[in-house]
Image: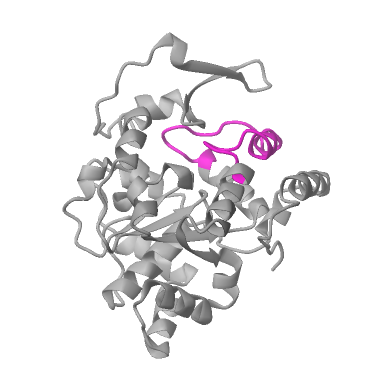
Amino acid sequence: MADVKPRYTIGEIKEEDIVRIPDGKGNIKEVINVEDMVVPIKMIKSGHIPDMRDNLKKIRAMQCREDDVFLCAYMRSGTHWVWEIANMLTTGKLDYLTQPKESAMMEFNYPEEFDEMPSRRILNTHIPLRLLPTEVKDKKLKVIFVQRNPKDVMVSSFHFLQKAKIVPFEGTFEEYFMLFSTLGIMVNWFDYTLEAEKAMKDKELDMHVISYEQLKKDPVPTIKRLSEFLGTDRNDEFITKVADKCSFKGMKKANEEVKIKDKFKFEEEIMKGHYRKGEIGDWKNTMTVAQSEQFDEIFADRMKDSSFKFDFSK
């Protein structure tokens, strides 16, 4: 991305802010702990996204509109998919948005950059729900939470980050497996998911949960429930057309032909690796039996008190 001009000015990074993590190969990775999120220094220094240290404070203090919707998901869980669906439901139009999802992604923009967006805004993010604007809770704004089984999330994010332009993952899948299972990518998957479940159980947020697998296997009723949550009340014919337009094939084609890339080409670079397979159970093609069993043990321990159910098979 040498030819892509940075968009943001980055604040000073002090030595005492840096955390150095061994990668197991004799190398040291430099990161910064930002609100208990592990953020690679290279990501902050890139200038292609706002300085997370500054932006998370701005996000918390962000003034929200009464009809704002916040789409939250761990990376590679189906954010692009549900974002396109939600926008069709709210606009009542069967048109793909020409702007990429990243244009409405909270950690990729400062809050004031959303001021010109027409209502109803569907803002998306991968940050933990505790870091959402305080007004989301105070005003009981609608939150869509997308889940995907963590084995597919792990494999999908591994392949995606191998191609990442800002901070590519250069290790083996075995190394990535250990990283994902323990520290996590930016934030630990288990911590992220359990925090969201607690917020839902405690009724801190007006939250609607969508399963990636359920949306894949049974799209029309899943989209209908989302429509009801959003109060859009679209009929079955419209919802069936939305499901067809937002199939994996349709979304991939729209990504290549419809989306208008950012003038600095940042979105164009990161969008190249978004659409790979979109399958359920693809983890079996990468993860060994031993790794699967090891993860099952970790999952059983960390999620023993969770009521969330996950579909790991086709």
Please tell me whether residue 92 is drawn above or below residue 276 in the rendered image: below
Q: Residue furthest left?
A: 116
The picture places residue 143, in percent across and down from the top left corner, at 42, 60
| Among the 4 quarters of the image, the one containing residue 9 | top left
Please tell me whether residue 87 is drawn above or below residue 263 in the rendered image: below
The picture places residue 253, in percent across and down from the top left corner, at 39, 66
Please report the residue visible at 41 percent of the width from the left and 82 percent of the height from the top: 239
Residue 170 sits inside the magenta stretch: yes
The picture places residue 95, in percent across and down from the top left corner, at 29, 73
The picture places residue 255, in percent across and down from the top left corner, at 36, 60
- In the rendered image, which quarter contains the C terminus? bottom right
> Foreground residue, 162 or 238?
238
| Among the 4 quarters of the image, the one containing residue 131 | top left
Can residue 153 be seen?
yes
> Foreground residue, 13 or 306?
306
Please tell me whether residue 219 is drawn above or below residue 97 in the rendered image: below
Please report the residue visible at 74 percent of the width from the left and 48 percent of the height from the top: 299
Can residue 127 be seen?
no
> Foreground residue, 93 or 140?
140
Please tell me whether residue 53 is drawn above or below residue 192 in the rendered image: above
Q: What span is in magenta?
A: 161-189
190 sits to left or right of 4: right
